[in-house]
Amino acid sequence: MTTNYKIESFICPCCGKEFETRIVTMITHEGQDSDFLPHFVGGNPLPFYLAKCSNCNYVGYPEDYSLENSQKYTISPSQIKKILSLPLAKKIPPEAIDFFVAAKIYEEQKKNPYFTGNLYLRGAWCCRLIENRKAEIELQQLAIRFFKVALEKSTISNPDTVSVVTYLIGELYRRLEDRKAAREWFETTVESIIDPEQQWLLELTQKQAELNEYLIN
Ligand SMILES: [Zn+2]
């Protein structure tokens, strides 16, 4: 079993053009990194989670193209151009740029910062897969920023997800070698876990907290 794709057609909510693109329908992975990057069997399918308009570069998840969402969250081609001309956009490799642009569009549309953070995190994963550490750092920092806003503004309704995001902030700080911040967020994670079904997260947090204290690299 490997990754499956299908060709789907979309109508761009930004410029109105119809286009076809390849979308991932199923992935196979064996294990994952400690920030949940799946170890894919075969090539990186992440970019195919997003659909990009070939005319104006609008990019989003397939559900962002639904009539309901595209009417609710509007964006103009000039806003997309502005995003692509940001100095930071120039530092992001082609493998990750769609996640960066999709996240910036979510920012413009003031969508749930948890989803924005997730887009930046996926962009950071794409950078890791091609060993572009500089761009990975930029996107990890953005992921942290939006995950923190999501927690501050309580935009995540599921308490189990709150614990996972709290852990992720700690783990991203650890990967950014900010030991003090990582320690604080790991401690908060341990305190936040009440569901016995999250024993796996408790164990993972304790393991990464230990690495944070003792691993010298
Ligand atoms: Zn378009």
Image (cartoon, rainbow, N blue to C red):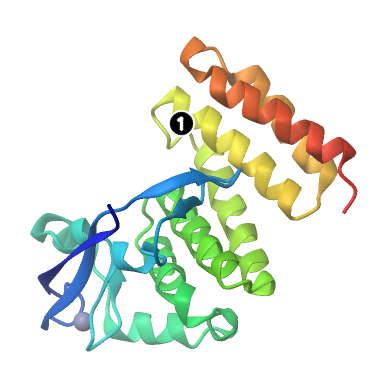
Residue position marked by numbered label 1 in the rendering: 161
- Callout 1 crowding tier (Cα within 10 Å): few <14, some 14–19, many ≥20: few
Q: Nearer the viewer, residue 119 or 80?
A: 119
- Is 155 rendered above or below residue 7? above
Q: Secondary structure at mark 1?
A: helix
Q: Is residue 121 left or right of residue 189?
A: left
- Is 176 rendered above or below residue 85? above
Q: Nearer the viewer, residue 42 or 164?
A: 42
Instruction: Judge: label 1 CB < 8 Å from ligand 1.
Output: no
Kind of residue sitting beneath label 1: Thr
Q: Is residue 174 left or right of residue 18?
A: right
Q: Which residue is the extreme one toward the front?
A: 1
Ligand 1 falls in quadrant? bottom left
Residue 217, located in which quarter of the rendered image? bottom right
Q: Is residue 26 left or right of residue 46?
A: left
Q: Position of residue 179 (x, y in %)?
A: 83, 44
Q: Residue at x 57, y 18 (%)?
A: 193
Q: Residue at x 61, y 35 (%)?
A: 167
Q: Position of residue 133 (x, y in %)?
A: 68, 70
- Is 14 rendered above or below residue 110? below
Q: Position of residue 27 (x, y in %)?
A: 31, 53
Q: For the image shown, how many numbered marks are present on the structure?
A: 1
Residue 20, located in which quarter of the rendered image? bottom left
Q: Residue at x 33, y 86 (%)?
A: 78
Q: Position of residue 70 (x, y in %)?
A: 17, 63
Q: Residue at x 38, y 87 (%)?
A: 81
